[in-house]
Image: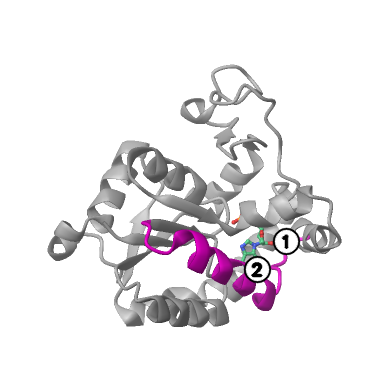
Amino acid sequence: MKNVIFIAPPAAGKGTISDYLVKNFNYVHLSTGDMLRSEVASGSLLGKEIDALISKGSLVSDELIIKLVESKLKNELFGKLFILDGFPRTLPQAEKLDEMLISMGVTNNVVIYLDVTLEEATKRAVGRIVCPKCSRSYNVYYKEASPLIEGICDDCGVALEKRSDDTEETFKKRYQTYLDSTSPIINYYKQKGILESINVMRTQNEVAKDILSVINDENVSVKRRKSD
Ligand code: AMP
């Protein structure tokens, strides 16, 4: 199986698909958003600076995120099957990631672009509630994504919370940041020929089927949803 690198607008479902891959296969999940939020939760000075950026829908600096990811990649992910969720988010991050993966000899990777409309992503963000313990996310607007007991995580039994950046106003800014800084990476990976595009506005089973077909090494010759 291949290492997975997700490129997607905010709230497209990277976290939910990552949970599925971790539960069903041998994947280790690295979410840069979760990593930054735990720094915020620690109350450190750096956490306060990060919080100010996240809350207004901006990105943290390339320098900081590259340093954090580089250390995780080399110390915790090396030799494992991994998912990068939320990195890279800018062209310099993508270029640096290439450099790191090449230097580590990690070549079996696929970049998956999650295709979702702005309207759908907004609904997913505004309705999202998250478990502060395991980071599993639910959505109050979708029955199949709601917790069994209202407001409580099915897995941990703790009260679910709303992310500070999941308001409609901040979401608009996050989406604009995505268009300005992240969407240029789509072309970058397209040109490298390792980009797969998956429409995530379908049932979970349909999305899972497509994900499996692009992460399986055996299926390289039968990719059906190659990006145009
Ligand atoms: P996410 O949980 O992936 O939606 O990320 C939440 C927020 O963390 C983003 O809106 C950014 O402010 C910040 N963030 C996450 N990953 C990165 C990254 N690779 N580069 C810069 N900022 C990031």
How crowded pointer 1 is (Cα within 10 Å; few <14, some 14-19, many 20+) is rated as: many
Quarter of the rendering containing residue 147: top right
Horizontally, is 66 left or right of 30 in the view?
Answer: right
Amino acid, disc 2? Thr
**The one of 169 and 111 positioned closer to us in this rendering:** 111
Residue occupying the point 38% across, 45% down: 21
Tell me, yes or no, whether the two marked residues, 1 and 2, touch with CB atoms within 8 Å.
yes
Residue range highlighted in magenta: 56-81
The dot on residue 21 is none
Residue occupying the point 51% across, 81% down: 96
- Residue under pointer 1: 57
Residue occupying the point 59% across, 59% down: 32
Instruction: Pinpoint residue 62: horizontal percent, then vertical percent.
Output: 65, 76
Callout 2: CB less than 8 Å from ligand 1:
yes
How crowded pointer 2 is (Cα within 10 Å; few <14, some 14-19, many 20+) is rated as: some
The dot on residue 177 is 2
Callout 1: CB less than 8 Å from ligand 1:
yes
Q: Is 69 located above or below residue 30 in the figure?
A: below
